[in-house]
Amino acid sequence: PAQLPPFGLDRALRRVNGKAALLRRLIVSFGESYGRVGDDLRAMIRAGRIEDAARLAHTLKSVAGSLELSEVPDLAGQIEAALGAGESGAVAGLIAELADRMAPAIAAANSLQPAPSQASADAPAAARINAASHASAEARAARDALRQQLCRRSLSARAGFHAFADALGLDAGTRDAHPVLQALLRLDYAEALRLLDGTQPETGPDNGEVAT
């Protein structure tokens, strides 16, 4: 669409060199990755995973900023700062406010999802395109290494993801928003593996494409 509030599409498009298809995928991925960010933060804090919660808030701040969401980056930054200062008990109100500000963004992102019937119809074509893509040997090897790390639930999987992203030629903003990395930041190895198994090595954003 020409407009998608609360996302600032005009400015966000400039960040991705005018590649509308890429921006659409990033926004859809944002909705999938952060749809329950308030609950995710609360669960991490309850489990004593303060560093993981701060890292999630930091990544949200970066990704929301790149998608030109107002208020969300500032709130996420406040949560990150409070957790870094050991004030985890003071973030409940900030998380509630963040969830309120995120709700319209998640709804907008989800509105870009294809209808289930259309998604089913498009799946075989997408699979053929992916199967036919000529991935580099480096990208295939990096993907295989990352898959092994995920199967072992290894903490080195984050570094493995970045090696894979390097092989694909993904820029910093694209990789930060990638759902595989978002799952890793939540330490959800099963979800990261599921997402990776649906990812084929393709060329990076230089051709206007990005692995999803």
Image: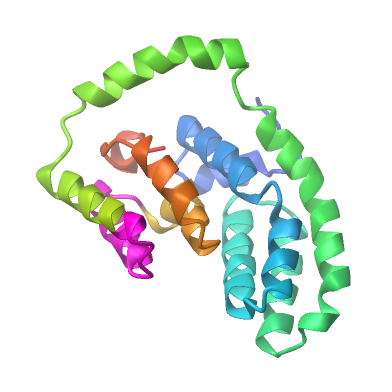
Start and end of the magenta stretch? Answer: 149-170
Q: Is residue 35 above or below residue 79?
A: above
Could you tell me which quadrant the N terminus lies in? Answer: top right
Which residue lies at the image location 60% right of the left edge and 16% below the top edge? 116
Which residue lies at the image location 37% right of the left edge and 54% below the top edge? 171
Going by the picture, which residue comes out furthest to the bottom?
85
Q: Is residue 154 magenta?
A: yes
Any part of residue 178 in sight:
no
Any part of residue 119 in sight:
yes
212, 146: nearer the viewer: 146
Q: Is residue 177 left or right of residue 137?
A: right
Q: Is residue 123 left or right of residue 43?
A: left
Give the image quarter of residue 202. Answer: top left
Q: Main secondary structure of the magenta part?
A: helix
Q: Position of residue 55 (x, y in %)?
A: 57, 72
196, 136: nearer the viewer: 196
Q: Is residue 156 left or right of residue 184?
A: left
